[in-house]
Image: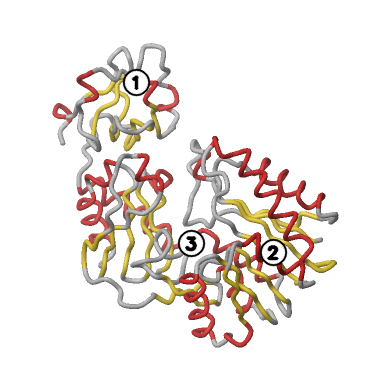
Amino acid sequence: MSENSKPIVRLKPKTSDLPIKRGYPWVYDNELVLDRRTKSIDAGSIVQVQSSDRTPLATAAFNANSKITLRILDLNPTQNVDLGWMTSKMTAAFDLRERLFDQPFYRLVHAEADGLPGVIIDRFGDICVVQPNAAWADREFELICEALDAVIPLRTVIKNTSGRARKLEGLDAESSLFKGHWPQAPIPVPMNGAIYMADLANGQKTGLFFDQRPNHAFGARLAKGARVLDVFSHVGGFGLAALAAGASSAVAVDGSEAALSLARQGAEAMGVEDRFLTRRGDAFDVLSALADEGAQFDVVICDPPAFAASKKALDAGLRAYEKLARMAAPLVKEGGYLGLCSCSHAADLDKFRAASLRGLSRAGRASRLIHTGFAGPDHPIHPQLAESGYLKALFFRL
């Protein structure tokens, strides 16, 4: 698209252009002139952003249906968002991951932090799962995949449309196959000496959570010879890593039988199924039942879904994190270790840590914080976007 053909969207007179110039990647609806002409621009269109005095500022993606009305794509206001531009972004993302990892299993593109707002791409060998979570990415999906294929020759590309982000953009939830064939079986993914089974067709999100890789590794360092409890285990995240590191046993707790089945398949692939047990049920109910049974573990790790998925849910979410810490702590033997995780961007590190400490205090357990972990380097943090630093992991000795 040439400069002259781009629609123009302007900031309101009292809206500063400094955030854009300093790299903030979003512009909200209340910061823009949204007159009839502007609102008629198709969702996902590439536009030129101008200040209120008509100074060109940037190239952006537009969606009047979203509170995040503009997503900045490039600070060059005349930039064409074409195959060359897209391939350069994809190449930069690929080069970073190839430096970081010996095997082709990782988050390849992490949205704004990799210069492709709203685009998530996870790589599973010669298969990629793409989540176009913004209107522009959905509209330019074929271009994204063309650039992806130019950088990494792939057998299969899956379009995954699950998740809350697409709903906020006014997008559908129709996943589809872009290239190749649907995987007929879960994909074995090696990480930290463990093997995880990723269901790319029907699993949660893209099929596996790569972000916890360094926290799995830290938890595993505590687990040699230990009895481990992995709560909200999904496909066996912390439990299988612990067994790979020499844990004497691991119990995985999750509400999804499909996830637990994949966890058991992972344990079988590792040859540790004799040391691996699963319990299906509501995590809080299972924690209560284990306490009634007098169960004790050397290491307990809880990795729940986002209890505070938005600012409105923050207070309730913090109470849930406090409750989880309070109920998990009694299951940790004296001198053992408790790991507590949060993937809620609305609950920052200070708030999450304070809620966890309140829970430990109410459980009557003295604690020492021995490690704070975050997402792995294939999930980079955009320096202007706090939301990209969503994952926190606290490890305590009790």
Classed neighbour count for the residue bearing mark 3: other residues with Cα under 10 Å, few (<14), some (14–19), many (≥20): some
Residue located 59% across and 62% down the image? 282
Q: Which secondary structure, mark 3?
A: loop
> Disc 3 versus disc 2: distance between alpha carbons?
23 Å
Amino acid of disc 1: Leu
Does 40 sit above or below residue 385?
above
**Residue drawn at the location 23% of the way across and 72% of the way down:** 181
349 left or right of 370? left
Q: Which residue is mark 3?
A: 209
Question: Where, by quadrant of the figure, is residue 23 drawn?
Answer: top left
Given residues 276 and 95, the one toward you in this image is 276
From mark 1 to mark 2, how far is it between C-alphas? Answer: 49 Å
Q: List x then y, in percent, for residue 383.
A: 51, 39
SS for dot 2: helix
Q: Amino acid at mark 2?
A: Leu
Label ID, residue 97: none
Q: Would you say 274 lies left or right of 68 here?
A: right
Callout in the foreground (3, 2): 2
Q: Please rate how many residues cluster around mark 2, counting C-alpha atoms within 10 Å: few if below 14, some from 14 to 19, many from 20.
A: many
Residue 369 is situated, as x and y percent measured from the top left of the image, at: 76, 54
Give the mark, 1 or 2, whose residue is nearer the N terminus.
1
Q: Read off the residue under disc 2.
A: 287
Q: Give the Cα distance between marks 1 and 3.
A: 36 Å
Nearest the viewer among 88 and 206 is 206
| Badge 3 amino acid | Phe
Label 1: how many Cα within 10 Å (few below 14, some 14–19, many 20+): many
* Secondary element type, mark 1: loop
Sequence-wise, which precedes: disc 1 or disc 3? 1
Q: How was this image coloured?
A: secondary structure
Instruction: Measuring from the top left, give residue 311's x and y in whole percent.
Output: 54, 36
Q: Which residue is mark 1?
A: 32
Does residue 58 sit above or below 222 in this rendering? above
